[in-house]
Image (cartoon, rainbow, N blue to C red):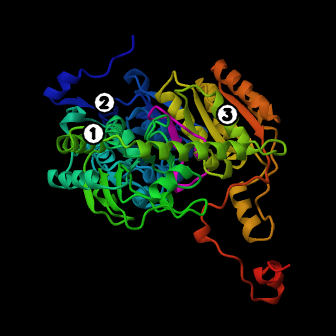
Amino acid sequence: MAKQSLDVKQVINQKMKMTPSEAIVETLVAEGIKEVYGIVGSAFMDMLDLFPTAGIRFLPVRHEQSAAHMADAYTRVSGTAGVVIGQNGPGITNMVTSVAAANQAHTPMVIISPSAGTPTIGWDGFQEADQVSIFQAITKETVRVTHKSRVADCLRTAFRIAYAERGPVLYDIPRDLFYGELEDQILQPYQYRVDSRGSGDPVLLDKAADLLKNAKYPVIISGRGAVDSDGVNTVKQIAEHLTIPAAVSYMHNDAFPAEHSLAVGPIGYMGSKAAMHTLKKADVVLAIGTRLSVFGTLPCYDIDYFPKNAKIIQIDINPRNIARTHPVEVGIIGDANAATKALYEKLTEEVPDAVENQGRLEEIAKAKKEWEQELVDLAMEDGNPINPRRALLELTGVLPENTIISTDIGNVSSTANAYLKFNQTRRHIAALTFGNTGFAYPAALGAQLAELDAPVVAIIGDGAWGMSLHEVSTAVEQNIPVVACVFNNKSWAAEKKNQVDYYDDRYVGSDIEAPEFAEVAKSMGALGYTVEKAEDIGPIIKEALDARKPAVVNIYVDGTQLAPPFRRDALQMPTRYLDKYKHLDYEVWGKE
């Protein structure tokens, strides 16, 4: 009979003798950790041996980068910090990209980072790397275990900072410190960390309420913080009380219900024109749980929509994010849910009766209807073989209401921003502003593990798919029924669009030759489908979802129907001075 984890009440009341590995595992159990992602390694094998008995599932991936993407999405859906681990040296350094992505996504995560043993540190031995230095710039903190008696204490510190500062923390432990014995007690999370910073300064909340009630055209931007704090319903109450249109921040389309009469959709690259035209008119902006990132507020569709003179009320749990990118009139440091509730209470005190602005409602409805029609019109243009927008329209049209959708970075994946609508929170899992490809599929796997009964679909370009298709083996092995929708235009299309617009259709490195992805999926034990007709997309997606097995749907789309460049502000027409390159100068070919 398997042994059970330590009696928590007993351990809280007294110190007990245990090994460092046991202390680490019992701390993970206290934190509610059910899965740890990574690839097996000798450095942490003593701890790994305890996982099955402790009730922790070790989920082996095919590449460590995938581990942190899975943990990232798991956290976004479940609210519980993800945990990853790898072999010291290359196993941990393989996670750099995905940890950096989680850091910019504000996702709590703990990276258990075995390092070289204490007797050999600094000898450049086998699989040695200065992991602390490598991760310092891409984590909220790096916590070093300096003695075996500190293993549980340091791990508690890692979780405390990960939740408090909303991001990954490196827990670095020399590999020999998993062994030995110590005396310690296993604390419960409430004994060493607090998850809320409260509702913010009452004086500033009064000022915010005053600005909103006197605004001529207030607009809400609801962000990730509103989702993570379960505060979207209160955001909705504020919107309804003063008839305030509500946009969602870049790639957080689940931060306000799309079906709501005050919802105008997402801002940011390939967002909603209805949201942009609405936000442009604002005299007061209530930004809830969003850092208002530079990329997420850049002009799009040639609309410079972020209001230059609006008074901004920004609510964020992290003081570093207040006024970081845009000057604010009121900056409130607090939990998005708690602060929004407090603000709503003040508004209802000062404006007891809800203010229904019928004209504003009609204006919003008109803007949304026009934008929806434009999306359909753009999708219905012919493509060879399929217009990628048509594929997105057909795909989103058949997905169940509770579907979790992960999106990658790339031309089609980003175009999806305009077509993705959610009425439930924790449904939209996007790569966000770190912008690395290969995110969506491992993220979808993590999201599925966080919510086992929900349909989960990943939207990925063929370039990004090449970076993540190896994880189909993981999905098959672990029976994770994610449906990968690969939009195959045989190119790195976002970069190809730059070469179209700025380099006279000179394609260097942007064309892709690849195998038939559906057949590759079948060879790995998954379901595989190839789609070359738009009308087949809906039925095939429904079939794949109903099967509840890992599936890959390879959708061939037109490689010439491309979205605008991500960063027009960062590109310029080429100038060439040397004679051998003069024919590449815009002044030469641009006038032809």
Q: Position of residue 577 (x, y in %)?
A: 75, 89
**Residue under the point 33% across and 59% down:** 312
Q: Is any part of residue 194 visible from this angle?
A: no
Q: CA distance from mark 1 to mark 2?
A: 9 Å
Chain-order first, disc 1 or disc 2: 2
Is label 1 in contact with label 2 (beta carbons under 8 Å)?
yes
Distance of mark 2 from mark 3, alpha carbons? 44 Å
Residue 256 placed where, x, y %? Answer: 43, 39
- Residue type of the residue flagged with mark 1: Ala
- Which of the labelled discs sits on residue 152, or is there none? 1
Specify the label residue 26 is tagged with: 2
Q: In front here: 575 or 215?
A: 215
Classify 11 as above or below 286: above
Is 584 within the magenta?
no
Q: Between disc 3 and disc 1, whose residue precedes?
A: 1
The picture places residue 307, in percent across and down from the top left corner, at 43, 63
The residue lying toward the viewer, choosing from 206 and 477, is 206
Name the residue: 72% across, 61% down. 497
Pointer 2 with pointer 3, Cβ within 8 A:
no
Q: Which residues are magenta?
A: 418-439
Identify the secondary structure beneath mark 2.
Answer: helix
Instruction: Give the crowd class for mark 2: few <14, some 14-19, many >=20 residues within 10 Å.
Output: many
Callout 1 crowding tier (Cα within 10 Å): few <14, some 14–19, many ≥20? many
Magenta stretch containing residue 422, yes or no? Answer: yes
Say which amino acid is labelled 3. Leu
- Residue 395 has which mark? 3
* Drawn side of residue 243 relative to residue 182, left or right: right
Task: Report the side of 539 relative to 199 (left or right).
Answer: right
